[in-house]
Image: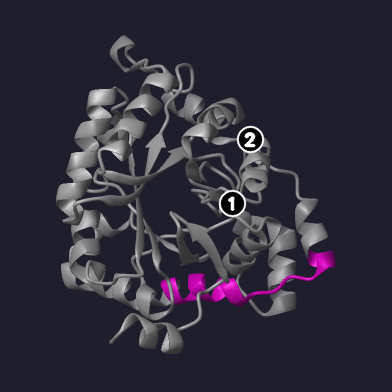
Amino acid sequence: MSDTTRDATRTPRPGGSFTLAGREVARVGYGTMQLPRMSDADAARAVLRRAYELGVNHYDTAHFYGNGVANRYLADALGSEQDVVVVTKVGARPAKRGPMPMMPAQRPEQLRQEVHDNLRSLRVERLDAVNLRRIAPGSFPLTPNQMVKFDDQMAEMVTLRDQGLVGHIGLSTVSAAELRAALPAGIVCVQNQYALTSRKQEPVLDIARAEGVAWAPFFPLGGAFPGSAKVTHEPVVQQIANEVGASPAQVGLAWLLQHAPNVLIIPGTTSTSHLEQNVAAGSVQLTTDQVARLDAIKPAAGIRGTLSRLRRP
């Protein structure tokens, strides 16, 4: 099927569309982090194919998700689709043990190696977009070897782009100051923790919105760590879900989409039915009054304080 025919007959992009890495993507995307948990590779690929059938063409991934497993599923299922935009990330490596699923890999030479790892497992010659997952000193117990200047990391990312290995540069877990410093290099997306119940990153979102940079929050429904508030547990969210005939999760995702035009949601799941519910959140319309009631929910503590508590002996 030609690209022209495909454009004329394709499924509408769920949640509308936004420009990412120079291409139009659905505002409801898919995150692959959970895929390596699946023991059935065919089932994992089927979830990815179903997402594509529903109009999803933005996929968030990383080689350190299962040491290349998630990337290989993506390459198998969607590698031939020309309209798919894959955003991967560097700055971490899989953890062999311990409470955290990944360990820092922040040095420029490690960032370069991770780019090559992603190229290999995705089976491509150039990555569409790569998020530098920044781990700032003081936000995580880094060894001296992993305390790297942000400018040095950005210099390496720009070099990788200049060499044609990376198409576009994004950032993850960055501060407002870091985003402002990186903007002249050309940043296409930011991926920070953000949800209705966790809005400490609002100043960073404000910058991204003003600059037309995509905002792809992780943990979009909160509750990722013990003690962190879950969006779906909020009474107001549950009330509004009843009013609009949707699930509380769909209301939480719909709020994100209506909160700012540059928001791209990337919820992940291993279930096709759950995937379909997430995609349907792109069609949930909240009234001005409902949005105001959701806005009035008091946000909970951010991820940094929660991680500090988890690391204490």
The reply to whether the magenta stretch includes residue 120 is no
Q: Which one is in front, 227 or 209?
A: 209
- Image position, residue 258 (x, y; %): 68, 62
**Marking on residue 230:** 1
Task: Give the residue number, with chain letter if any, for mark 2.
Answer: 301
**Residue 5, image quadrant:** bottom left
Q: Which residue: 55% across, 49% down?
A: 215
* Residue 283 in the image: above or below residue 306: below
In 3D space, how far apart are the residues under numbered discs 2 and 1 (Cα atoms)?
A: 12 Å
**Marking on residue 161:** none
Q: Residues within 10 Å of mark 2 (few under 14, many from 20)?
A: some
Q: Mark 1 is on which residue type?
A: Lys
Q: Are marks 2 and 1 in contact (CB under 8 Å)?
A: no
In this rendering, position of residue 71 left or right of residue 253: left
Q: Mark 2 is on which residue type?
A: Ala
* Residue 310 in the image: above or below residue 12: above
The residue stretch that appears in magenta? 275-290
Asked whether the viewer can see residue 152, the reply is yes
In this rendering, position of residue 303 left or right of residue 301: left
Q: Secondary structure at mark 1?
A: loop
- Image position, residue 153 (x, y; %): 37, 25
Q: Which residue: 68% across, 36% down?
A: 203
Residue lying furthest right: 289
In this rendering, position of residue 23 left or right of residue 215: left
Q: Which one is in front, 181 or 205?
A: 181
The reply to whether the magenta stretch includes residue 287 is yes
Quadrant containing the N terminus is: bottom left
Q: Secondary structure at mark 2?
A: loop
